[in-house]
Image (cartoon, coloured by chain):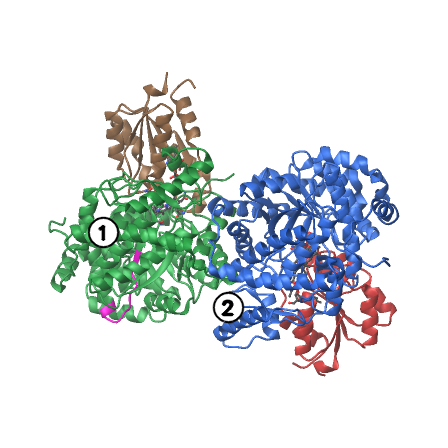
Chain colours: A blue, B green, C brown, D red
Amino acid sequence: MFTEKVANKRLTDEEFFRIRREEVLSQWETGKDIENLQECIAAAKELSEGKNHALRFLEAKRNGTFILIPQFGRALTEYMIEGITYVESETGLVPDGAWNLYSDSYTRKKEFRKAAAGIERSRKEGMSMLNGWPIVNFGVEEARKITKASKLPLHFVTCDEDARLASEIALAAGWTANSVTSLQECISHSTTITLADEIRLMQYDARLAARYQEGGVPQCPWNTSHLTGYDSPGYHSFVHVSEAVLAAEQGVKCQFLSHGIGMNLLQDIAMIRVSEKLCYEYCARMGYEGVEFVAGVFPFLGAWPPRDDESNAMIAWNAAIPALGGFPGMILKCQDEAFATPTKEGMARSVRLARHMLTVMGSQRIPESAALRQEEAMIELEVRTLLEKCLEIGDGDMAVGLCKGVAAGWVDTMVTPWRHNPGKVLLVRDAQGAVRYLDAGNVPLPAEVKQYHLAKIAERESRDGRKANMDMVVEDLQFASKLP
Amino acid sequence: MFTEKVANKRLTDEEFFRIRREEVLSQWETGKDIENLQECIAAAKELSEGKNHALRFLEAKRNGTFILIPQFGRALTEYMIEGITYVESETGLVPDGAWNLYSDSYTRKKEFRKAAAGIERSRKEGMSMLNGWPIVNFGVEEARKITKASKLPLHFVTCDEDARLASEIALAAGWTANSVTSLQECISHSTTITLADEIRLMQYDARLAARYQEGGVPQCPWNTSHLTGYDSPGYHSFVHVSEAVLAAEQGVKCQFLSHGIGMNLLQDIAMIRVSEKLCYEYCARMGYEGVEFVAGVFPFLGAWPPRDDESNAMIAWNAAIPALGGFPGMILKCQDEAFATPTKEGMARSVRLARHMLTVMGSQRIPESAALRQEEAMIELEVRTLLEKCLEIGDGDMAVGLCKGVAAGWVDTMVTPWRHNPGKVLLVRDAQGAVRYLDAGNVPLPAEVKQYHLAKIAERESRDGRKANMDMVVEDLQFASKLP
Amino acid sequence: MQAADKHIVIGTIGSDAHMIGAWVLQKGLAAAGFGVTLLGAAVPQEEFVNAAIETHADAILVSSLYGMGILDCEGLRDKCVEAGLKNILLYAGGNVAAPLELQSNWPEIEKRFTEMGFNRVYRNTVTVNEVVAALKSDLGIDS
Amino acid sequence: MQAADKHIVIGTIGSDAHMIGAWVLQKGLAAAGFGVTLLGAAVPQEEFVNAAIETHADAILVSSLYGMGILDCEGLRDKCVEAGLKNILLYAGGNVAAPLELQSNWPEIEKRFTEMGFNRVYRNTVTVNEVVAALKSDLGIDS
Ligand code: B12
Ligand code: B12
């Protein structure tokens, strides 16, 4: 597909429009409805009035308030509208909310024919047989119906390799956040694509967002580290900073940093602080000016418990962490998490629960402490080492360095479907439930960091009276889904 | 009723048995079934085997683990047994649980005839028409049925002025914790009784617990600051320490410190640390040796929200605080809180939720920090000042000092039904949701503490753009019960 | 007719120690212009009646939170009638029943309180404004 | 007959990227003595069949987590039959349906998978031990 070598360089107008014409709009028939980019931008400007993601999130950051972000995705437009309006009207989500909307996985793999069959099937069965909304099949006018039905900023999860057409349609519909990822997508959702190819695809998405921004529709694409649910905090931050730099090069001016968390209060807060700090620092250092970052939390991405009561605990604790950390974006999973795509009732319940967490604890913050500083220092050391090595090996080019790092085996994490991942890393939880490297593989952890992790694991070993090993790794994967 | 002056002195055997005969056992016909104290102690020893409150709680404290404590109280014995066995079997509460069991309020006011009518009425209606289990009407054999039905330590809420007969029956049934309170009872549940009378009544309860302990049945009576739900943390700690000293004088060797909390993480943790520390310190100073204290949290005693989702948030956050504080006792309210006495289904759901909080966060603790130290220092200063003033004015006698303090108007709190409370104090929440003195009345707050509170209130005033006043006080009473 | 011409007696009945609700209510009614006497907590029926006579009250607001409101309120209307307060308004409010099954069956609760001679009964989710509006309407006050 | 004589192919079907379940399952089955081939995630039907032929597999365990398992599994039995694997055991497991209404109607799910020619279908609450026991029973292994 892509033969050129990758580089962290802004797409020229010429390239952008060539790709747009040849590779993107032609993917499916609905591409033709958005041929005129100027018109799309003008329409988006109007449609997103009063519910712009970037403006609302930056405002929340300034004011120290929170935005609750439920998720939703169903096969048919009417289900989408029904769900969105239900939650908005039943929960008081407006105005301090936003939406994280999903396409189905066929769409995310460009299997539009399968998605079409899924739409038909859903109509026939009278329920959603797809795990999200097939935006490409439905096209921009349908998407605009959703925009109009909601009072809130909309983000569309445009990921899984090539989501360029989905991005085009979402932004043309007045949704004000797509996804600007890269390594994240490979690790979470891919098997064979190369990182270089993924980066090239995502450069387009980023450049597209930047064009809308430049055209007067502020954008806040999501820079995420949702990953597999079982990754080191340092790896998360590394993913964020590298993605930040790549998106900034394309002209993106505001990014939402959606961090998958491990549910260890101190470690998660430390991780997010390090990410945010280094996103600013590295962008500034590489000459990208005026780029803003808004930090957020995506609830634990590992296995959830299959019962309401335990899920309620998960929802609460996953909300308590951003609250105590003071991170404005609180994405929500719901009580249906272990079973099926969220129902509207489930999302409403989850919004109400999280909202009340904010009512009772929303202004409380974790105090500064030596323990938090230490956790931050350890993560920062890990992330800086990886970033510097990337820049070094890539001759100052983050994209090149990233690709080389994966190929050389020192950019690594655990249990991903992605075949190019080295897969030597093993992680377990320590005595406080923080995530630690049992085996760092070829990740160039500074000796100090490595020792810190091993010492923490040793604490657990002595508490539990057994050695950390593969069995413990497997058990830990399921620690939060177990019922008594 | 009591003509003698109060003093913090152990009841002599002679006094104890005279009171027992003349004032306690004769209160109701079931008193005669427990005439022989030696036999009662022997029976209790056997019945409490393997589920002793003191032993289990001290063990949890040593191991850094938690005990979940649901509550229950219904009019009929069969309802009690049904509820207890349901929760124990549906939640995995055994072995790391205990029960907080309630009598009805008629029993707590010695209105045994009304309680009898309530029993009849409940039978007729086929549901519980009393807000708890009328232990005195039912007597010791019925109570023993409950002991046998449960696998866990049982605490009986023996309070509301004169609960001496209830205490006698509960302990004779092998329940291993009654209540040793005093000012707490006046503030929470009383209108006209004098503090001196209340202390005298509670001295009997404490001495009774000590006798069981001396007879080989370890006891862990509850020393509580449940109060009204709207009291300063310093007042809470002060209540605990004063109660600790009074109970220790009677020979009580282990006390469970059940703190009503305000739901401000730092302030609550600081309060509990101060209480525990000063309980040890003052008991040692007054010569009571080998007294142990186990700290716990009673969920917010102010108004709860009238919907499940918001109640789930309350349950979660009220569990997170003892978890992060490392306090072994986690008492639970449930989703029924705003409406009616807890159902067994509600208690089971709440246990499962809290248990999963422990699964995901149970080994995480709040780190030491300057902010926490400052909060502790402020509370400690307040409490020490009150305690010292009591001892000074009481000539070294805590009971006398307490009574004089109330009479003189410098022992004071807010919105209690107790007519002897001075009632000049007004509390509001600050910008972080911590409870602060808007008006300290005649409470001898050190100037430093007073200024600290006012400065904190000023932060909120400037955030909210309005002055703190009575309206704010009234609003704050309901801050956690409001739905959007 | 004005709120200031009307007097209301409020208290928590029986052995019930909850008094925050009544306290909040009193502040709200006073702010709405009513004359209000707050009797506090654990108030016997007789005391309600005596206070109503003494203050020439137009309404008695009985608060009951602890779950035994039905038992505690039985006979209050009779006592009012005996004392010559046949037509005095009687409201109850709070958490009037202990079991959730009854508490969540509100038509049944209303039926029982009507049978006991109460004019209105309210859940604890009622707002002060709703209570003020009901009083004004029942007492013929222009709003 | 022993577990070591039996070979199992495991993978996640369709466009599904979830592979932790299959990975955990593989470890469990291997520990129980089975020969196991793990195909990873996003495995097309053809690849399952080819791997089964290649490894002389006795069972194919299809994992599907992302909610479109019904759509992805249709036709797999036919492909097996065509390839001469008429009697190979077919199990499915995970979160096989997207809507909660279907996912929580398990008899309906079982009916559908039976109609599709699957021998068993499991929810995601199944334990590895239960899967091992079913395989042993279906494959006639002494336990
Ligand atoms: C605070 C509180 C306490 C405090 C009371 C402090 C005080 N000084 O008042 C303390 C901790 C002392 C306490 C003690 C007990 N409590 Co309590 N308490 C509560 C709690 C948490 C909040 C009540 C409150 O203050 N709300 C805030 C105020 C502003 O609202 P409100 O009282 O509902 O009043 C409003 C409305 O109801 C209405 N209203 C009230 N009265 C009236 C009357 C009329 C005529 C009208 C129109 C309107 C009206 O207007 C008010 C203002 O908006 C409730 C549960 C809840 N609701 O969250 C339990 C609750 C009321 N308590 C309960 C019980 C059982 C007890 C105890 C027996 C012990 C126990 N098992 O916990 C003791 C009572 C002992 C005794 N002798 O009475 C139960 C009652 C169960 C039931 N009804 O079936 C409840 C519901 C908790 C529960 N689910 O178990 N409690
Ligand atoms: C971890 C996870 C992810 C990770 C996957 C990482 C990885 N490398 O595998 C990430 C974050 C990448 C991810 C992505 C997505 N996910 Co996901 N994910 C989960 C989650 C939280 C846990 C799954 C897990 O790993 N469990 C732990 C393992 C050990 O258990 P298990 O997978 O259930 O497997 C066990 C059993 O099911 C059984 N089993 C499994 N397969 C088989 C097969 C047979 C034959 C047998 C007998 C038994 C069996 O044995 C296994 C071992 O015990 C679940 C929700 C949950 N369950 O908590 C959602 C969930 C599966 N994901 C879901 C979705 C929709 C997605 C996405 C489409 C995006 C989105 N909307 O979130 C993408 C998928 C993109 C794609 N192309 O596939 C949905 C599926 C909805 C549905 N079925 O209706 C779920 C249920 C969440 C939800 N409620 O929305 N996800």
Residue A431 is marked as 2
Residue B111 position within the rendered picture, expressed as x and y whole percent measured from the top left:
25, 47
Q: Nearest the camera: D13 or C89?
A: D13
| Residue at the outermost bottom position | D1
Q: In the rendered structure, the residue with mark 2 lies on which chain?
A: A
Q: How many marks?
A: 2
Q: Is residue D76 left or right of residue C118?
A: right
Q: In the rendered structure, the residue with mark 1 lies on which chain?
A: B
Q: Is residue C91 magenta?
A: no
Q: Quadrant of the N terminus of chain C?
A: top left
Residue B361 position within the rendered picture, expressed as x and y whole percent measured from the top left:
50, 60
Q: Which span is picked out in magenta?
A: B213-223
Q: Residue at x 68, y 75 (%)?
A: D29
> What amino acid type should be assigned to the residue bearing mark 1?
Asp
Residue topped by disc 1: B162
Q: Nearest the camera: A60 or A301?
A: A60
Q: Nearest the camera: B65 or B37?
A: B65
Q: Is residue A469 left or right of residue B224?
A: right
